[in-house]
Image (spheres, helix red, strand yellow):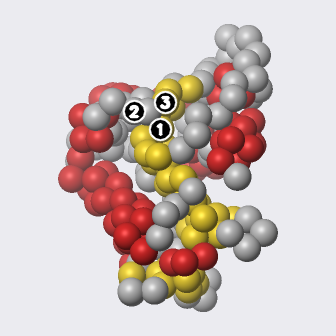
Amino acid sequence: MITVWTSTDYIVINVTLPYYDLLKTVIFANYIIFKGGNKENLMVLIKDVYGILAAPVCTQFSFAKTRAKTPRNLRDGMELVIGCLNIIWECRYEHKLAFWAMENPMGYLRQFLGKPVFTFNPCDFGDPYTKKTDLWGYFNIPKKNSIKSNKSLPSISEITSSKQAGKRAITPAGFAKAFFEANK
């Protein structure tokens, strides 16, 4: 998923399956077309992009994948990371983004992107669970509003449906609000 904030009243656009397929994105000199999925193509003018928060699928980079039935494929995982970075880079070439960030749970992505700028747990921002998450990029560090939490999300082995897997992948609401406040 990639979230694009435009400068016009902070319109937030989520570019994610099943609506849009990031790997089918077409970048032109002045605009980006997000294609695929089950919605009409979406055209975004590069000059209108205020900031980008990218969260590529973490499956291949997760430490939990060690116990999975299918082998890890870092090349497949990096395809989405590179797709997100291409969009970030194209927007940055054309004008100064207020911010950009790449988010992923702490895992093997560090071996490709290096040490993250910031690492947090959702409970650092008021959400009642832990899940160490890394952020790389150019952004203002959000102000923490910590609560104590002994609760963690269900482990991968406890997940029995795609709905539960989807819940694990959602950017925590408290963090999203704090990140927006720090970077608006």
- Could you tell me which residue is drawn at 56 percent across and 26 percent down? 120
**120 or 89, which is in the foreground?**
89
Label 2: element kind: loop
**4 or 14, which is in the foreground?**
4
- Could you tell me which residue is drawn at 49 percent across and 30 percent down? 118
x and y percentages locating residue 13 in the rendered image: 65, 68
The residue pinned by badge 1 equals 135
Mark 1 or mark 3: whose residue is earlier in sequence:
3
- Could you tell me which residue is drawn at 24 percent across and 41 percent down? 112
- Could you tell me which residue is drawn at 69 percent across and 65 percent down? 12
Residue 165: quadrant of the picture: top right
The crowding category of the residue bearing disc 1, from other C-alpha atoms within 10 Å (few below 14, some 14 to 19, many at least 20), is many
Taking 25 as reference, is 151 left or right?
A: right
Residue 182: quadrant of the picture: top right
Amino acid under disc 3: Phe
Amino acid under disc 1: Leu
**29 or 26, which is in the foreground?**
29
Label 3: element kind: strand
Q: Which mark is residue 116?
A: 2
Q: Marks 1 and 3: CB-CB under 8 Å?
A: yes
Label 1: element kind: strand
Amino acid under disc 2: Pro
Q: CA distance from mark 3 to mark 2?
A: 5 Å
x and y percentages locating residue 16 in the rendered image: 55, 65
x and y percentages locating residue 167 in the rendered image: 64, 43
Q: CA distance from mark 2 to mark 1?
A: 5 Å
Taking 69 as reference, is 24 left or right?
A: right
The residue pinned by badge 3 equals 118
Q: Marks 3 and 2: CB-CB under 8 Å?
A: yes
Mark 2 or mark 1: whose residue is earlier in sequence:
2
Q: Which mark is residue 64?
A: none
